[in-house]
Amino acid sequence: MSNSEPPVVQPLLRLEFGQRIALLQPQEAVMLRDELHAIDDPSAVRLAAQIDVAATMLLAAPLHAGVRAVRVADDERQVLLDVSRKLEYLPGGSFAKLQHELSIG
């Protein structure tokens, strides 16, 4: 008898900017969203709202959410780079990787 359960996929946020991507855990997405909310800039607010929707889905149904993608607009890249620089020294290294990808992309 075979197991008919689909494989469990780790919930991740996929940030897409240009030809580059960065993957974040749901908890990291929440930290990023909170930092973006703290910035008084329309592009930061817009990006925070998109990340909020994706993070909410990832946290609400982690076994079914899979990977949620957020495409970062050109005018949102600088604010995302600024926030990633602020968060790059947190354990895990995801924000350092994000900062690196934004810097070279």
Image: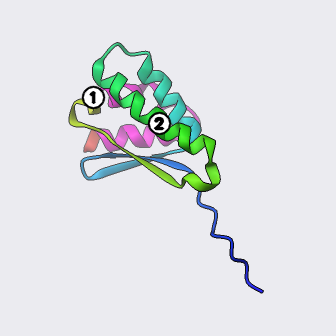
Given the image, on which type of amino acid does mark 2 rest?
A: Val
Occupied quadrant, residue 45: top left
Give the extent of the magenta segment.
Answer: 79-102
| Mark identifier at residue 78 | 1
Label 2 CA crowd tier, 10 Å (few <14, some 14–19, many 20+): few
Res 92 visible? no
Classify 81 as above or below 94.
above
User: Residue placed farthest to the left in the image?
Assistant: 74
- Which residue corresponds to the image point at 61% horizontal and 41% vertical from the top-left? 59
Secondary structure at numbered mark 1? helix
- Which residue corresponds to the image point at 29% horizontal and 20% vertical from the top-left? 42
Classify 29 as above or below 7.
above
| Mark identifier at residue 103 | none
Q: Give the number of the mark in front: 2 or 1.
A: 2
Q: CA distance from mark 2 to mark 1?
A: 21 Å
Occupied quadrant, residue 105: top left
Secondary structure at numbered mark 2? helix
Is 28 in front, or is 98? 28
User: Residue placed farthest to the right in the image?
Assistant: 1
User: In the drawing, does residue 91 fall left or right of residue 33?
Assistant: right
x and y percentages locating residue 38 in the rendered image: 44, 15
Occupied quadrant, residue 1: bottom right
Give the residue pinned by disc 2. 53
Res 49 visible? yes
Given the image, on which type of amino acid does mark 1 rest?
A: Gln
